[in-house]
Image: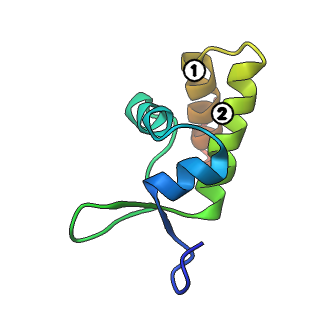
Amino acid sequence: MGPKTGLVSIGKAAKEADISRQSLQYYIMMGLLEATKITKTGRRMFDEETIKRVKLVKKLNKSGYPLRAIRELFLEGRTDMKGKGR
């Protein structure tokens, strides 16, 4: 993690999650996760929770879940957490 902010760049986040930078960028594009912060210069930065989520996505995907199904699970969880669920 970064010395002061606890945030790391996309390359370091990908390395910590043991996936390629391209895979991490694809997860973002698919809506599976978002950068924790975007700097003034446009750099995407990630925290430990986001890296844990990347690891979870990777694990679920290796277990046979398609990325779209994983995305739906996350979206349902977000909705329920906000109290707007079924």
Q: Nearer the viewer, residue 27 or 76?
A: 27
Mark 1 residue type: Leu
Mark 2 residue type: Val
Q: Residue at x 61, y 17 (%)?
A: 69
Q: Secondary structure at mark 1?
A: helix
Q: CA distance from mark 1 to mark 2?
A: 8 Å
Q: Residue at x 41, y 38 (%)?
A: 25
Q: Residue at x 24, y 61 (%)?
A: 42
Residue 36 at x, y = what percent? Answer: 46, 61
Q: Nearer the viewer, residue 67 or 76?
A: 67
> Which residue bears the numbered disc 2?
57
Q: Are marks 1 and 2 in contact (CB under 8 Å)?
A: yes
Within-10-Å neighbours for mark 1: few <14, some 14–19, many 20+? some
Within-10-Å neighbours for mark 2: few <14, some 14–19, many 20+? many
Q: Is residue 29 above or below residue 8?
A: above
Quadrant containing the N terminus is: bottom right
Residue 13 lies in what quarter of the image?
Answer: bottom right
Q: Residue at x 57, y 20 (%)?
A: 67
Q: Is residue 46 above or below residue 59?
A: below
> Which residue bears the numbered disc 1?
67
